Image (tube, helix red, strand yellow):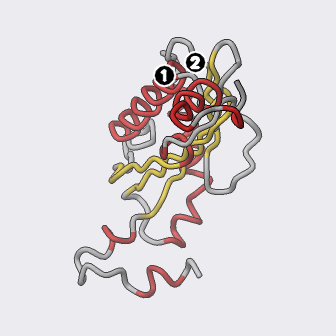
Amino acid sequence: MDLYSTPAAALDRFVARRLQPRKEFVEKARRALGALAAALRERGGRLGAAAPRVLKTVKGGSSGRGTALKGGCDSELVIFLDCFKSYVDQRARRAEILSEMRASLESWWQNPVPGLRLTFPEQSVPGALQFRLTSVDLEDWMDVSLVPAFNVLVAAKGASMRPASQSCGGTL
């Protein structure tokens, strides 16, 4: 049965069977990302003693919205860290933080999630650490971007709960 001959009452089942990734893969990938977020909160994204504190993690992308399609999907994991003092500071320290996050991720993956493989493609997005979670049968994959970020709202808290104009000025 193809999409055009599918009755309206059967569309949800058609989408689930033909268009969405297998539930087993989605569940394994979600568990892996949840465990990764917990590990980053615990370690602060670093292996060293002076680790920054993870203030918050936010998931996005088609996987985060529940709109992933069979084959490949994407997920963004934005990690707000307390080590950044401004957007300018974030930009200046981006390479250092991303390198430390990759080392932390590689260390964390020493106990891999059964049924998933982790690979690092060529890094093509500045400001993000990209990796791919792949099912062992290579049928499904999820491209993940870890994005360390400056939390302007936490930085503005002592003042008036509004970000200072100089905090946002560097983003324009």
Location of residue 53 in the rendering, given as x and y in whole percent from the top left corner: 34, 50
In the rendered image, the residue lying farthest to the bottom is 165
Residue drawn at the location 25% of the way across and 78% of the way down: 161
Residue drawn at the location 56% of the way across and 13% of the way down: 115
**Which amino acid type is marked by label 2?**
Leu
* Numbered disc 2: secondary structure: strand
Location of residue 96 in the rendering, given as x and y in whole percent from the top left corner: 58, 51
- Mark linked to residue 113: none
Label 2, residues with CA under 10 Å away: few <14, some 14-19, many ≥20: some
Residue at the spot of label 2: 116
Image quadrant in which the C terminus is located: bottom right
Front position in the image: 95 or 134: 134
Q: CA distance from mark 2 to mark 1?
A: 8 Å
Which image quadrant for residue 133? top right
Front position in the image: 97 or 156: 156
Residue drawn at the location 24% of the way across and 84% of the way down: 160
The earlier-in-sequence mark between 2 and 1 is: 1
* Numbered disc 1: secondary structure: helix
Front position in the image: 30 or 102: 30
Image quadrant in which the N terminus is located: top right
Location of residue 153 in the rendering, given as x and y in whole percent from the top left corner: 33, 71
Location of residue 119 in the rendering, given as x and y in whole percent from the top left corner: 67, 27
Residue at the spot of label 1: 28
**Left or right of residue 45, residue 138 in this image:** right
Residue drawn at the location 63% of the way across and 36% of the way down: 69
Mark 2, mark 1: which one is toward the viewer? 1
**Left or right of residue 30, residue 172 in this image:** right
Question: Pointer 2 and pointer 1: residues touching (CB < 8 Å)?
Answer: yes
